[in-house]
Amino acid sequence: MPIEFRRSWITPELESFRSTVVRFLEDEMLPQDEAARQRGHVGHEIWRRAGELGLLCIDIPEVWGGAGGDFRHEAVLCEEMARRGLTGMSISVHSIVAHYILNHGTEAQKQRYLPRMARGEWVGAIAMTEPGAGSDLQGVRTRAERSEAGYLINGSKTFISNGHLAGLVLVVAKTDPALGAKGISILIVETENCPGYQVGRVLDKIGLKAQDTAELFLDQVRVPEERLLGGREGLGFAQLMSDLPYERLIIGLAALAAMEGAYEATLAHVRQRRAFGQTVADFQNTRFKLAEVATEIQVGRAFIDRCVEDLVAGRLDTVTASMAKLWGSEAQGRVIDTCLQLFGGYGYMNEFLIGRMYTDARIQRIYGGTSEIMKEVISRGM
Ligand SMILES: Cc1cc2nc3c(=O)[nH]c(=O)nc-3n(C[C@H](O)[C@H](O)[C@H](O)COP(=O)(O)OP(=O)(O)OC[C@H]3O[C@@H](n4cnc5c(N)ncnc54)[C@H](O)[C@@H]3O)c2cc1C
């Protein structure tokens, strides 16, 4: 019997949702992926199409335009993309942005943004990182100054996922530099026809070629007072911290799904590739390596599934979610490296999924908090 990586949280309803997701990815996203990688972004049309199919903001309540599902639906979508190496639409960032608005936004903000995000009209981005501040968010220099007509924002951001296509950006800025973490706020910037808002070039990355990661420049960008997330200054840092379990678990579960995808692709390859009068799968080394990979995935599945169940039940803590991100991203690097080796020279080619997965995997240990920061967080919980 072939090894199966069964999820403890799957239900018949989620399986049927998975079929819808797979149809969309295979019929509509995969055929366009090569062009998106050449261009550096997937374009707006596919976002709107995903919205039409009800695949965006799946775990946002229907009253705000979402699909009324829960985190497991989001997990299914992220997993199916990750196992196919489809990284162009950063659905996870889009969902994270929607969750900031859901969890911290005023009623008016939820009504204005969530339905548009669910329809894919506005792609969401979150802009924390700056040229001078990444891991240490308290070092952000972007300033939002209160004026009579709202806030004036000045600063620059870098490495912003969905940055080229974003219709709304949550900008992390200092509203009171003297107050440290308590002086940080999040402002919602609507990017269309926004004087002073400029998107730099799509950055040339070693992986995630279809995803638009961009620099953003804000020069006297004026936003009305009602675009302060949650309506009160100084809440930004706490807002960012409270949503960490959601963000980190998405990275961890996508990592595990990418490992599954790599394992399946490798199994298919070694079974047909021949050397020394036998298939590569016949070598004991190949079988042992894949046995190790399958075991690592199976063990990881137990932990990630528990995290998914805990998140759905509202009890996933930041330390455990940081472990999911740390373990998942590190294991993804190890597993994909092992799998690539079994492809020989073909593994090094971008036209092979495993080659793309290799470069795509590297960022997982860096964004959403680096592995070193995960260890800091985990060790503080000891
Ligand atoms: C493709 C991509 C997409 C991204 N998407 C987004 C996005 O959508 N929005 C956004 O805001 N940002 C985004 N980022 C930025 C990303 O989150 C940061 O790059 C990351 O947090 C690290 O920050 P940094 O690059 O400034 O590195 P630094 O903070 O300068 O870190 C450099 C090194 O020092 C280590 N280090 C730092 N502090 C400590 C410490 N206390 N203890 C031990 N080691 C430490 C780090 O682990 C790292 O190894 C993205 C980055 C990339 C490359």
Image (cartoon, rainbow, N blue to C red):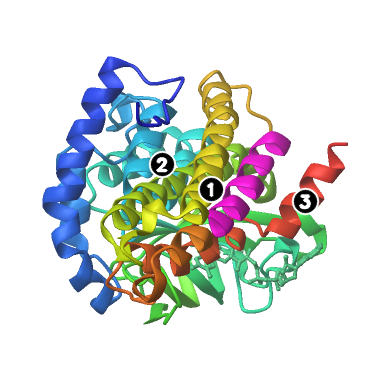
Dot 1: few (<14), some (14–19), or many (≥20) neighbours within 10 Å? Answer: few
Vertical order, 157 against 248 (above or below): below
In this figure, which residue is indicated by the disc labeled 1? 288
- In the image, residue 71 above or below residue 90: above
- Tell me how far mark 2 sits from mark 1, CA to CA: 54 Å
Quarter where residue 344 is shown: bottom left
Of marks 3 and 1, which one's residue comes earlier in the chain? 1
Magenta region, residue range = 318-335
Q: Which mark is residue 109?
A: 2
| Majority secondary structure of magenta residues | helix
Find the distance from the CA under tag 3 to the CA under tag 2: 35 Å
Q: Earlier in the sequence, mark 2 or mark 1?
A: 2
Q: Which mark is residue 299?
A: none
Disc number for residue 375: 3
On the image, which quarter does residue 195 sit in?
bottom left
Q: Identify the residue at horizontal 65%, vertical 56% (top origin).
A: 369
Assign a secondary structure to mark 3: helix
Residue at 41% x, 41% y is 109
Residue at 58% x, 44% y: name it: 248
Q: Is residue 156 left or right of residue 59?
A: right
| Residue 324 among those drawn in magenta | yes
> Are dots 2 and 1 in contact, CB under 8 Å?
no
| Residue 305 x/y as whole percent | 52, 27
Q: Left of 87 or right of it: where is 16?
A: left
Residue 226 visible in this rendered orientation of the protein: yes
Assess mark 3: CB under 8 A from ligand 1?
Answer: yes
Name the residue type under label 2.
Gln
Q: Is residue 96 left or right of residue 270?
A: right
